[in-house]
Image (tube, helix red, strand yellow):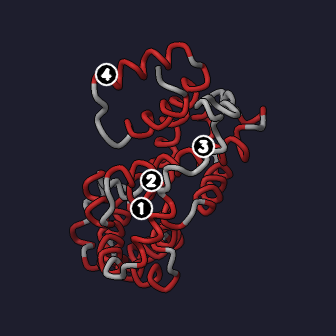
Amino acid sequence: MLSCKEVTRLLSQGEDRRLGVVERIKLGLHLRVCIACARYSRQLVFLREAMQRYRA
Amino acid sequence: MDAAPFAAELDAQRRYLLRVAHLQLRDADLAEDVVQETIVAALAAREGFSGRSSVKTWLTGILKHKIVDAIRQKQRQPIIVATFEDETDLDEFDPLFKDNGAWEAPPADWGDPENALSRAEFMGIMDLCLERLPPNTARVFLMREVLELETHEICKELAITANNLWVILYRARMALRQCLEQNWFSEPSRR
């Protein structure tokens, strides 16, 4: 089972490399039950959008 | 486009270009040089500007190459590698998480964050939060998110491992997320 700290690290890495199948499964399971990390995941996506807007 | 209005348009983008260059290079003189080179190159390439993208986007593309060249020059100084090691210490206590890896303070609900993107004040907060990042962290983060370089390109340019890079980017994102939450999304009216 992944801890929230490990999940946040993996999610961040997912922005820069392709995650493996096992990683994605573990991530998916955690995100389904953890509201905090699900929020973090959405906020990461937003952060990237914000940087695109900042750049444009 | 005629030369004079085009040159004026380029000049209008100077502040934005300086801001990006300064965040990347952390050297006011070097940033000034790089921006000057960018504008000169843009003027020379005026005929080739199709007008399909915005001037800002096109200029950012030119700036990207000038910044990478400047970083390559700077890299010949070994000091940079040492400071990266400070910022990638994996054993560092992480105050954002408890010992068991659970959140110390979980992320708040940001409501509908896309609303923020059209607000100029929000971009001001972005500036503030980016400025607060440690210099090497900011540099790397902008290489990834503004210059849009790939992992292997950044690693090659800065002579760091992929793991170093991912730790730095992780720290940048965690810090930015927290800064935006504290300085923008914690206001209920802003969600």
Q: In the rendered structure, the residue with mark 1 lies on which chain?
A: B
Residue B71 vs B133, above or below: the answer is below
- For residue B56, which numbered disc appears in the image? 1
Regarding residue B40, the answer to whether it shows in the image is no
Task: Give residue B176's position: percent from left, percent from top.
Answer: 59, 48
Circles 3 and 2 on the same chain? no
Mark 4 or mark 2, which is nearer the start of the sequence? Answer: 4
Relative to the observer, which residue lies in front, B25 or B88? Answer: B88
Q: Categorize mark 4 by other alpha carbons within 10 Å: few (<14), some (14-19), many (20+).
A: few
- For residue B68, which numbered disc appears in the image? none
Residue marked by disc 2? A56
Side of B3 relative to B111 (left or right): left
Between circles 1 and 4, the one closer to the viewer is 4
Mark pair 2, 4: CA separation: 36 Å
Circles 4 and 3 on the same chain? no
Callouts 4 and 3 close, C-beta under 8 Å: no
